[in-house]
Image: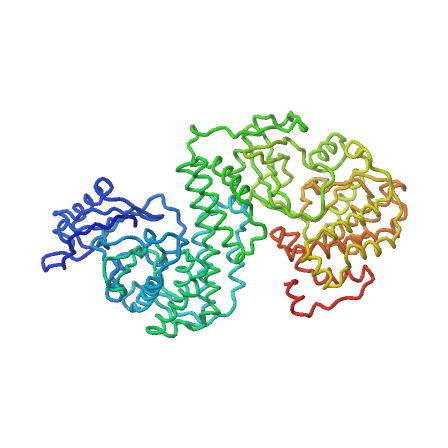
Amino acid sequence: MDAPPVPRPPLRERTAGQRPAGRHRPDVVSAFVRRAPEVGVASGGHHNRNHVLPLSETVARVVPGEVGAPVLVRVRRADALPVVLRTWQREAAILRAVQDAVPQAPRCLASGPGFAIHSYVDGVPLSQVCENGEAVAGPVIKALAGLMAQVAQVRREALPSSLPRNAKDGRSFLRMLAHRADRDIRQSNWAVYGGLFVALGVSEDALIRWAERVPVMARRPYSLLHADLHRDNVIVTCHNDPSSSLASVDWELATYGDPLHDLAIHLVRMRYPDSQWGQVVDAWAEAMRESRPAAVNGLRRDLPHYVAFERAQSVFPDVMRAARSLEESFDQRSLDKATAAVSEALAGAAEPLRLADVPSDEAIEQILYRWQMSSPRRDAGARTPIGWEPDRRVPEHTDFPHTAVQRALRAEGAAPANRVFKGTAHLNSVVRVEGVDFPVVVRRQVAKVCRREPSFLSEHAVLQVIEQSSVDVAAPRVLALGTSYRDERFAIHTYAGRRDIDQAPSHPVNGLLPREADALVDQLCALTRVNYKVLDPMAGGGRFYSWLSEQLVVLVGDLPTESRQLARAFGLPDAARLREILSRHVVSDREPALLHGDLNPWNLVRRDDAMALTIIDWEMAVVGDPLYDLVRHMHLTPTRSEIRDRMFRRWSSGLAAKYTADWQRDWRVYRDIEIVRSAYIDLDRLVTGAGLDAPNVRRAVDSYAMTLASATAALGLPARSTENPCLALALR
């Protein structure tokens, strides 16, 4: 509503010979609407294009209006994204219902397929008086509160049909809203934008999980809600009376329900400074107490939940609109603007949706760039090549030439959600490349990864050595390594999942089957035949346990202050004391070998051949004691005692004595150090929220109380009770 305030003759009342709004000669009105873009003053929003123009003599004969009086022609945008919740399809019916209670609202003079003609509200949008983020004058806040109170007085009988019954409490209404938003906004656009959201760290069940956490709330009488009252939809009129100096326009998203929902939408979309929120809430409560006192029941307790929902659901339309805007203009300025919009949306949704790792602005820009460059909406003839620089440490692969790399990078941004996997350290996009008869995965490191355990070997070098060794280890092949837009590093590997890449890969999350346990042991045995000296020429000096325990001590000493303080409160020792305890153990030196280092079930992908499992994600690989790799796997993966015994038997009989000496005595030492490691790392994840969207991390922190008890027992320390409410808060 950006039209300038132009004084015009007032609308006259309909005379006996005139037709009522909505009943008109369609040819006359349609011709008038078609001319609107040519002769009218244009403005528009996300859903409509608005044109202000004088009422023609021909149209004035069939609709209620004075010749030359300004009217607003609203034309529905055919390209509008379906990202809003609509209760009623016809705005005209809503405007008829509010005429008596909200006299300043526009009137619908005529409507038809995809258009409407409204009376013109003379004035300027509030956004031109004070921009988003600026403080709003006290009298304006009071008038806005009065406006919402007026809307709440619209009689139920005047509204269009199909109104819901009052729910038992606010929670029922709010959960219904969340499920509707998930269905009508998230699901309806997921096929196109799902991959973008996964890359940004927003999961497909984020809103549903939020709805499950909504507590019981008070019951309030339902009423009409404007549901989109922000600065562009509030017109400052020329009236001197403060009570009638504001008019609300754009009623197409009006709905019926808990009045707190309207207040929450208004608070968030008006972009008030934080310092004014209390003033707005107080003004709304005062206005409502005069007309509908029951509407303020539970106001202070329940309003934050509605605000959280508004911010949570807004991430979906805001991100999609930002991405869509790049189709109209794709230069650095528009990319910066879209990046800022997405960053703001993610920041607002981070707390209610429990987004574990919100990407940095740099990472958001890179994700948007990749998505837009891959968008099928872009004119194929106008597409510019995706530039990249190869890393010469990985030479051009015979099965995947450099020309295929560029095609893979273009396909990466368009990968749908079911082919995009975000782990604790990498974003993986599975794509098919024209001219290549196997699927590949494009791997990028998560920009803000907070990983306490360091990497010691380069993943690409490890995969190259495994491939060159020709041992029976099922691992991806590295096909390319390089940098792309903004020098962001990437790697391309062969894909380890099913041939049908639309089927999710299967992981042994509940433990290995007997044949899988045998296959994994065989592959760990085969790793002893890989020439690790190529990767680490200095390895093999023995004393692996001493090195391993010192690495854990360093990790504990480097934890953030808050994590170390909470660890101490839970009874876990500090770094110096931990070094003393761990040094009591003596572990035999065994012949070293290449280890994967992180054999959790999500790093094992099921396959249908004799190999049974493909081992992925080798960034934690290290050279060390082969027994450690097997024991760490048993710690990270649910392992029944019979499977554990089976794996130990096969492993000890399949390797020479130099790899297995004294394993029966030493394996429990490795088990205990891994339990202790988990106690510190998982506690830090609870404190920082790092990596909580990864399934292996989520499962680990959900069972933290058990981990803590096992760790203190392994260290020979007394268990510290977690019944203290302050301590128990960390375990939620």
Q: Residue at x 43, y 62 (%)?
A: 277
Can residue 696 be seen by looking at this rendering?
yes
Residue 365: horizontal and vertical position, in percent?
A: 51, 40
Can residue 614 be seen by looking at this rendering?
no
Of residues 282 and 184, the one drawn nearer to the viewer in this rendering? 282
Residue 528: horizontal and vertical position, in percent?
A: 81, 38
Vertical side of 267 occupied by 653: above or below = above
Residue 82: horizontal and vertical position, in percent?
A: 39, 49
Q: Residue at x 70, y 48 (%)?
A: 452
Vertical side of 619 occupied by 153: above or below = below
Of residues 12 and 654, the one drawn nearer to the viewer in this rendering? 12
Vertical side of 42 occupied by 471: above or below = above
Residue farthest toward the left in the current orientation of the protein? 17
Q: Residue at x 19, y 56 (%)?
A: 21
Residue 213: horizontal and vertical position, in percent?
A: 54, 63
Q: Quadrant of the C terminus?
A: bottom right
Q: How is the image coloured?
A: rainbow
Number of numbered discs visible in the structure rendering: 0
Of residues 528 and 331, the one drawn nearer to the viewer in this rendering? 331
Q: Is residue 323 left or right of residue 584?
A: left
Please identify the quarter of the rendering in which residue 219 is found. bottom left
Please identify the quarter of the rendering in which residue 401 is found. top right
